[in-house]
Image: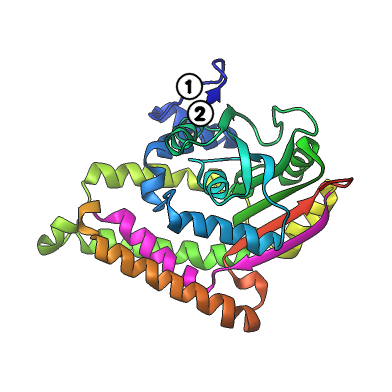
Amino acid sequence: MTVRPDDPAPHPHATAAEVEAAFEDTKLAQVLYHDWEAETYDDKWSISYDERCIEYARGRFDAAVGEADLPYERALELGCGTGFFLLNLMQSGIAKSGSVTDLSPGMVKVALRNAEHLGLDVDGRVADAETIPYDDDTFDLVVGHAVLHHIPDVEQSLRECLRVLKPGGRFVFAGEPTTVGNFYARNLGNITWKATTAITKLPFLRDWRRPQEELDESSRAAALEAVVDLHTFDPTQLEDIARSAGAVDVAAHTEEFAAALWGWPVRTFEAAVPDEKLTFGYRMAMYRAWLGLSWVDENVMSRVVPRQFFYNAMITGVKPGAGK
């Protein structure tokens, strides 16, 4: 497990002046926001490295790629966050070794710690997705989850992915918000947050209210979301960007319609109430409901609802040239 000693250290407690400056500097906002969230990110999004999330990550990969010659020798995760996508893909047999990169030093630190706990062969770098600090033809696979919408120049980042891929290597990005999906998801989340924080002010529901300083901190971080969330995508637009970057065998897929209409209010409610109120039984019930609605999306909604109305988009493409 290695990280370069000259990489910047995590900075989880931004000053008011730094936050103000971040509204004019999207990359500074990316660092401050994601460093702030790094240590609590897995809990916030119910991320784990067990069978549940292994199956989820592998399902996204298989939905995007289909049949593949596995395992890949070496994989890179761009905008790794806490390592959710790559580490779970590696556990599922997708790749033998990996590298994680993120603009946020805090996220790289947590991703490497997670990899170490899992016993995975992973190194890491603090890196800008538009200038990936690896040599040409280094990786067999590049992956990312919910990262492209944070990158100012998406086409440039995909060019960089193709540069560091070996000929015939593939990239797979999942978890990107569609334009229509983001509209209804964000509005549902905002309504749920306002309703929950208002109702829990009632005297008989105060036990269900997070401490005000935690709610204020969440609101402070949420204010930066307008700066760090730069794009939403139409699936066809994503395909055009990938082809313009130089990829071949490009295909976009979408998922989560009913599941997103359910999931966003649930996740927002969970962020607004104390963790101890959310029992194991409650969490399993919510998870089973999400699984059921995902089945409906895959087997029913995908046949009648246009792909641009689903919340999550995936994009895959291949670097031209010989490959396995």
Q: Would you place residue 20 above or below residue 87 in this image? A: above
Q: Using the image, tell me which numbered label, if any, was put on residue 217.
A: none
Task: List x then y, in percent, for residue 321.
Answer: 89, 45
Nearest the viewer among 36 and 26 is: 36
Hey, what amino acid is under mark 1? Ala
Quick one: SS at disc 2? helix
Instruction: Please indicate whether residue 219 sits to the left or right of residue 35 in the image.
Output: left
Q: Is residue 193 visible?
A: no
Residue at the (76%, 35%) spot, across then down: 164
* 166 up-or-down from 314: above or below: above
Residue 258 is inside the magenta segment: yes
Which numbered circle lies on residue 105?
Answer: 2
Cα separation, mark 2 vs mark 1, equals: 6 Å
Give whichever of discs 2 and 1 has the lower sequence position. 1
- Residue in front for this viewpoint, 155 or 51: 51
Q: Which residue is mark 1?
A: 9
What percent of the width, then of the height, locates residue 243? 83, 53
Residue 177, horizontal then vertical, whole percent: 59, 59
Start-end of magenta stretch: 247-273
Q: Nearer the viewer, residue 304 or 136?
A: 136
How crowded is the residue under tag 1: few (<14 C-alpha within 10 Å), some, or many (20+)?
Answer: some
- Determine whether the residue tagged by mark 1 lies in a helix, strand or loop: loop
Q: Is residue 66 left or right of residue 38?
A: right
How far across and how far down the image is residue 81, in percent?
Answer: 51, 41
Which residue sits at x=44%, y=32%?
A: 113
In the displayed image of the protein, which residue is found farthest to the right? 321
Can residue 13 be seen from the camera position used here? yes
Discs 2, 1 touching: Cβ within 8 Å:
yes
Residue farthest to the top? 6
